Image (cartoon, coloured by chain):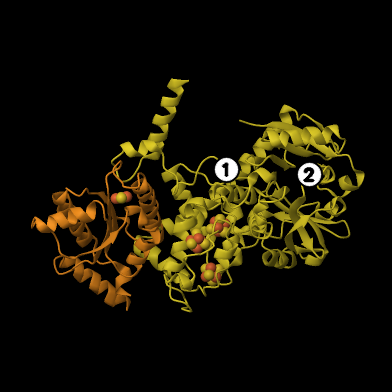
Amino acid sequence: MSGIMYLARSSDPKVLEKAESGGAVTSLLRFLLETGKVDGVVTAKARNGNRYAGVPVLITEPEELIDSAGSLHCSIPNIPRFVKEYLDGAMKMKLAVVGKPCDIRALIELQKREQIDLDNLILIGLNCTGTISPTTAKQMFIDEFKVNPNEVIREDIDEGKLLVMLEDGTTKSLDLMKLEEKGYGRRENCRRCEINIPIFADLACGKWGTEDEEERATFIEACSDKGRLLVEEAIERGFITAERPDKKSIKKREEKDNAEKELAELWKERDFKPILDLDLSKRLEYWLNEFNKCIKCYGCRDACPICFCDHCLLEASRGFLEGGEIPPDTVFPLTRLAHVADSCVNCGQCQDACPMDLPLSKLFSLLNARLNEVFGYMPGIDVDQKQPLSAVIMEELQVEDTFLDISSINKALQSKSSKRD
Amino acid sequence: MKTEQVEKRGSAKTHEDIFEPKIIAFLCNWCSYAGADLAGTSRIQYSPIVHSVRVSCSSRVDPTYVIKALMMGADGVLIAGCHPGECHYKSGNLLTRRRFMMLKTLLETIGIEPDRLRLEWISASEANKFASVVDDFVKQIKKLGPNEMGEQ
Ligand code: SF4
Ligand code: SF4
Ligand code: SF4
Ligand code: FES
């Protein structure tokens, strides 16, 4: 089911000037703040103007919104963790949160674990085809683009090209696949990510589908009633203008999405296959070698939005693991794997946090992909679908097998409910 | 060290009967543990190399206990609980089953034979089933050979 779609533009010329597309997101946020519908906006902002150090921020003054306009492709702010840790999970305030698909998915998973209050949140998702780790980005701009990273004022990824724009107005673009083959380009998890349009947010916003417009526009899909009302009211109050996209524009958006999905499948194959081709004993050796590099800094756990426990089993005080032992027992990474892999949203924060460069997101998303098949569960998409390791359905009481065939149980359930209708 | 390992494994394979697998069994107090007890008192013969851990419900077994056992060198892990519909906590064993499904996939992904882990439903009266499950599991583990983790 698809939501109502709009081609929208900000009514504020100042916003339009700075925005990459139609500036509609900035103006929607302004509308929310000015009318008091939210207490604050959570989004990413370059810290002290540094594009490589984007951080999550809470904005409460409409005037400050303009500084956060435009995307940061070379920063990796941890939006869900910020909402949960520092804003008390929005338990006591109303917030609009702007995020990439993986940020939104993590928030939905946190809601399932009652760590945030989704009723207090308006989720504004942005289309995303990937982000670049800040250190890789700077090196790549120097080595490959031959530009000074500090002079870059905008990046964009489109149609297989990475484009940068410099202070002096010049642009340069290079083939993304070629860059990635050399080890530059997007983060590994982003290459493998097949979710580009966050239709599980209240609004899914982006540029795709606006290419043929004479004036730049933002393509918005309102995916919930909350989202639709927001757009309608903002139009009514004059913050944005909007029209319906035509078929061509909708198709264009779909095509771009599909092309990225196909590419993601290729990357998955490329990254996962060599591991799965190893025989078991070699595979174990590979992972043990990696685990051996761990210095037990807890960075992965502290960055992972799904690791939410107040009293983590991996703390020495829990008596499960020896304190001060480095590298830690193999149980250390594997416990986290067992606890979160079913719900991993492939955000890559664990791997970014790891000082020893363990291929953590590769491990977690590989297992997650396999578990998706076992459980028919895609994390972070549907808030009503409970995580597979803590929810059971009563039909399972009738099954003796020790390994469930979940897809056939679901099929039986579906045919039962359709007979009832 | 490598060659020694290979040798050890090789020799274990040719002398299946010499290899005495270490097997950890997590047994639910309400059913399988009682089943094991009954097997004992009824003098039903079963392999003595199983170390039992009594748990209050099969769902008490955090997935990481299984991992820890295997990482410490156990050759096989058996979890046994009440039949579906008979768990004292209603759906504890259903959760166990889902964790088991996750663990099998996890083990295979990191390179440990998933067959080293087994889940069975054994009620308090099924002493014979307990004995045959244990014997069968021991046979299966002997075929797999020793867990590499135990050799490090
Ligand atoms: S395991 Fe890593 S990739 Fe998965 S949700 Fe946690 S931080 Fe993100
Ligand atoms: S590793 Fe497990 S116990 Fe620790 S925070 Fe993550 S989910 Fe919780
Ligand atoms: S971030 Fe890396 S080094 Fe730190 S605890 Fe996690 S795996 Fe180990
Ligand atoms: S009480 Fe036996 S499995 Fe739950």
Find residue A157 and report its horizontal and vertical position in percent: 71, 51
Q: What secondary structure is marked by label 1?
A: loop
Q: Is mark 2 within 8 Å of ligand 1?
A: no
- Chain A, chosen colour in render: yellow
* Residue at the right extreme of this rendering: A13
Check disc 2: other Cα within 10 Å, few if <14, some if 14-19, many if 20+: many
Q: Chain for mark 1?
A: A
> Can residue A164 be seen?
no
Type of the residue with mark 2:
Val
Find residue B134 and report its horizontal and vertical position in percent: 19, 56
Find residue A65 and report its horizontal and vertical position in percent: 83, 52
The image quadrant of residue A250 is top right
Type of the residue with mark 1:
Ile
Q: Which mark is residue A25?
A: 2
Quick one: quadrant of the N terminus of chain A? Answer: top right
Q: Residue at x 15, y 68 (%)?
A: B15
Q: Residue at x 16, y 57 (%)?
A: B37
Identify the residue position indicated by label 1 in the image: A381
Check disc 1: other Cα within 10 Å, few if <14, some if 14-19, many if 20+: many
Q: Given contact means CB atoms under 8 Å apart, are the residues at marks 1 and 2 in contact?
A: no
> Can residue A61 be seen?
yes
Colour orange, chain:
B
Q: Chain for mark 2?
A: A
